[in-house]
Image (spheres, rainbow, N blue to C red):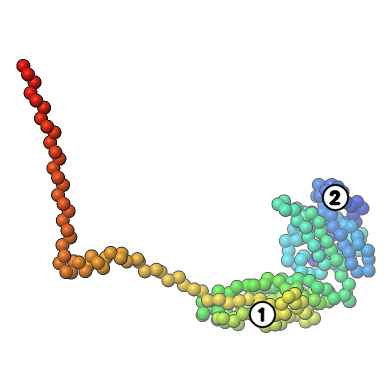
């Protein structure tokens, strides 16, 4: 993948801010036999480039001052809420220098696996990328992982897949991490309707012929005393 960069003379926070206003993104390229070089790139072109997977996981060809250089994306700083790239870092690549980088995983065959097709299981992708070490000529754009052999209760680890020629997995804390796990789908059981605790007692009383006690009759209201007749 190719892109064009331009040498940048000014540096500092103020200079970078003014550069972004003009639609440019400040950056730097370092490593190899050359010294670190300040660069700038067209923001719109860079914005479309970073949306491509190959820009993040493959050797790039950068044209700078009329010369082509092999570089690798190392850091990308984004604005907290704006769609803006604040700064970008590249590392020069030498043919005889081994690289350590992250490569995305591409999964296939999940729907054809026994775990999904016949055993009604759920496939969980634990990792989406691997950290690898290899020479520039052996850098893969991605690593394909075949899931067609997945079975119920069996997880897929790094040592279960075949890495491309010349590529080694770089362990960071785990020698053989899980790539994909398989779990059975648990069906929810409907709860039985609650039974009224008073119902059995009422049924027992009805069977024995018991009659419910009659409510006491209400007392008649007392009459008010008659008023004496008026004298003529």
In this picture, residue 17 sits left or right of residue 103: right
Q: Taking 155 as reference, is 217 left or right?
A: left
Against 9, residue 94 (above or below) is: below
Q: Nearer the viewer, residue 5 or 13?
A: 13
Q: Quadrant of the C terminus?
A: top left
- The answer to which image quadrant residue 105 occupies is bottom right
What number is the disc on residue 13?
Answer: 2
Q: Tell me which residue sits at (22%, 67%) in the image.
A: 203
Can I make out residue 63 in this image? no
Q: Which of the 4 image quadrants contains residue 63?
A: bottom right
Q: Which mark is residue 157?
A: 1
- Horizontal side of 73 relative to 34 (left or right) equals left
- Pointer 1: residues within 10 angstroms few (<14), some, or many (20+)? some
Secondary structure category for the residue under label 1: strand
The answer for how far apart the CA atoms under marks 1 and 2 are is 45 Å
Binning the other alpha carbons within 10 Å of mark 2 as few (below 14), some (14 to 19) or many (20 upward) gives few
Query: Which residue is located at x 15 percent, y 62 percent?
Result: 211
**Front one among 192 and 148:** 192
Circles 1 and 2, Cβ within 8 Å, touching? The answer is no
First in sequence, mark 1 or 2: give its number.
2
């Amino acid at each position: 993948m190719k892109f064009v960069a331009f040498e940048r003379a000014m540096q500092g926070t103020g200079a970078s801010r003014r550069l972004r206003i003009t639609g440019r993104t400040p950056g730097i390229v370092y490593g190899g036999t050359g010294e670190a070089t300040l660069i700038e790139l067209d923001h719109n072109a860079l914005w479309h480039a970073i949306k491509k997977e190959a820009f993040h996981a493959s050797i790039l060809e950068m044209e700078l001052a009329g010369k082509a250089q092999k570089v690798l994306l190392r850091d990308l700083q984004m604005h907290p809420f704006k769609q803006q790239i604040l700064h970008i870092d590249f590392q020069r690549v030498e043919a005889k220098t081994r690289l350590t980088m992250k490569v995305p995983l591409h999964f296939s065959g999940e729907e054809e696996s026994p775990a999904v097709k016949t055993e009604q299981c759920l496939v969980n992708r634990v990792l989406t990328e691997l950290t690898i070490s290899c020479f520039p000529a052996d850098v893969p754009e991605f690593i394909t992982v075949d899931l067609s052999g997945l079975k119920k209760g069996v997880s897929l680890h790094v040592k279960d897949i075949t890495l491309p020629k010349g590529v080694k997995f770089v362990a960071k804390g785990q020698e053989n991490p899980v790539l994909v796990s398989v779990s059975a789908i648990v069906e929810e059981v409907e709860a039985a309707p609650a039974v009224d605790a008073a119902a059995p007692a009422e049924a027992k009383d009805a069977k024995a012929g018991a009659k419910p006690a009659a409510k006491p009759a209400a007392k008649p209201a007392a009459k008010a005393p008659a008023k004496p007749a008026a004298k003529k």
